[in-house]
């Protein structure tokens, strides 16, 4: 995923682990897109606090809780 900052695409540093993108991110983005999210809304969702996760979905992915995040994403299908 990339976001525009000052007109340039940037990748959040936290999703790069040992030079590779966070492994669980690709599948999670796919679940969100399949659930009807646009790429922009999927990125926004990943960085929005969700009380059921006790933080942002991205924080949960970084903590290794991808199943919990994906279940929640599937339940939000539009």
Image (cartoon, grey):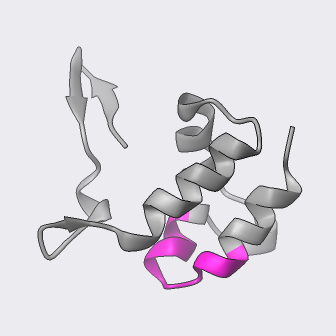
Q: Quadrant of residue 3?
A: top left
Residue positioned most to the top:
7
The answer to whether residue 54 is visible is: no
Q: Quadrant of residue 19?
A: bottom left
Q: Quadrant of the N terminus?
A: top left
Let me know if residue 55 is in the magenta part.
no
Q: How many marks?
A: 0
Let me know if residue 63 is in the magenta part.
yes
Horizontally, residue 70 falls left or right of residue 5, namely: right
User: Which residue is at the front of the view, 55 or 62?
Assistant: 62
Position of residue 56 measured from the top left corner of the image (x, y, whole percent): 60, 62
The residue lying at 14 percent from left, 76 percent from top is: 18
Q: Is residue 40 above or below residue 61?
A: above
The residue stretch that appears in magenta? 58-68
The residue lying at 26 percent from left, 44 percent from top is: 11
Position of residue 55 measured from the top left corner of the image (x, y, whole percent): 64, 68
Dominant secondary structure of the residues highlighted in magenta in the image: helix
Q: Quadrant of residue 65?
A: bottom right
Position of residue 68 measured from the top left corner of the image (x, y, whole percent): 71, 78
The answer to whether residue 27 is visible is: yes
The residue lying at 45 percent from left, 62 percent from top is: 25
The residue lying at 33 percent from left, 37 percent from top is: 2
Horizontally, residue 46 falls left or right of residue 26, namely: right
Q: Quadrant of the C terminus?
A: top right
Horizontally, residue 30 falls left or right of residue 7, namely: right
Position of residue 5 measured from the top left corner of the image (x, y, whole percent): 27, 25
């Amino acid at each position: 995923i990339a976001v525009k900052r000052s007109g340039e695409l940037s990748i959040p540093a936290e999703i790069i682990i040992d030079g590779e993108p966070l492994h669980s991110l690709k599948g999670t983005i796919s679940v969100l897109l399949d659930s009807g999210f646009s790429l922009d809304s999927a990125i926004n969702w990943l960085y929005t606090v969700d009380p059921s996760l006790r933080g942002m979905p991205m924080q949960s992915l970084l903590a290794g809780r991808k199943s919990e995040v994906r279940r929640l994403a599937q339940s939000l299908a539009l």
